[in-house]
Image: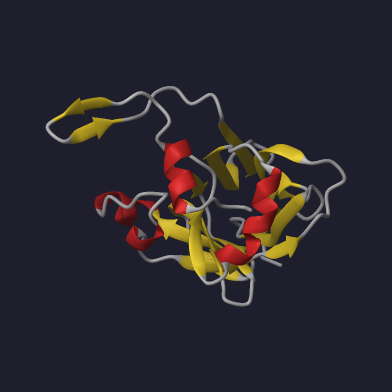
Amino acid sequence: MFAKLNAAVLTVALSASAVFGQGVQVFGGPDPDRKSSSVFMLDETFTPKAGAAIDYSAPEWKDEYNDMLDTLKGKDARLGKNWWTSLSTMSACEIGGAKIEAGSYFLGLRCDKDGNFHLLVLPAAENLKAKAAPWMPDTWKSGIACKLTFAKDSLKESVAKMQIEITADAKQPSSGKLAIRWGKHELSAPVTFEIAGAKVK
């Protein structure tokens, strides 16, 4: 549902034309489905006190993904398509109760044996050096698991292309939400931002 089987993932992720040479294939090019969601906390001088952004490529929903939920149990899976879905945060934060330090990260999903979802937050530098691939969970390094709430069939309208959003409350800027919406389903987690000079709730 929120991730495809590895064979299907490879078909989508490596969809550009290939050039063959010395046993290496070259894929890539412009990505019209690349999207972003960001949030900033600024003081009265517009100096940043906290901020975060998520960049991702949005796969299209297919109703057949509803039947894939049980196949995800006990597995890690990619989030999005093509290049990594990434998180950049200029201050520490908590996602689903797990502490994330300021920095750059790649994101994946974990579904435990009981069907509970977690967001996997992977240090970008370590995974780049390891040449970890977003469609090959066995290559991922050092993930932090952040608990997600799965609201099945909770959306009135089906979301045709995956939407990932990170927000903060205007009245309580340290409190926010991460939401992943696809089809009629939502995965979400509370986010607590560590704002410089302010107490964290």
In the displayed image of the protein, which residue is found farthest to the bottom?
114
Q: Residue at x 35, y 23 (%)?
A: 17
One can see residue 174 in this view: no
In the displayed image of the protein, which residue is found farthest to the left?
22
Residue 133 location in percent, x, y? 35, 49
Q: Residue at x 38, y 54 (%)?
A: 136
One can see residue 191 in this view: yes
Q: Is residue 16 left or right of residue 189?
A: left
Residue 45 location in percent, x, y? 64, 36
Quadrant in the picture for the C terminus: bottom right
148 w.r.t. 48: above or below: below
Q: Residue at x 64, y 61 (%)?
A: 69
User: In this orientation, which residue lies closer to the viewer: 52 or 120?
Assistant: 120
Residue 122 location in percent, x, y? 43, 58
User: In this orientation, which residue lies closer to the viewer: 103 or 46?
Assistant: 103
Question: Within the image, what quadrant is residue 47 found in?
Answer: top right
User: In this orientation, which residue lies closer to the viewer: 120 or 5?
Assistant: 5
Question: Within the image, what quadrant is residue 82 found in?
Answer: top left
User: In this orientation, which residue lies closer to the viewer: 64 or 22?
Assistant: 64
Q: Is residue 26 left or right of residue 200?
A: left
Residue 196 location in percent, x, y? 59, 56
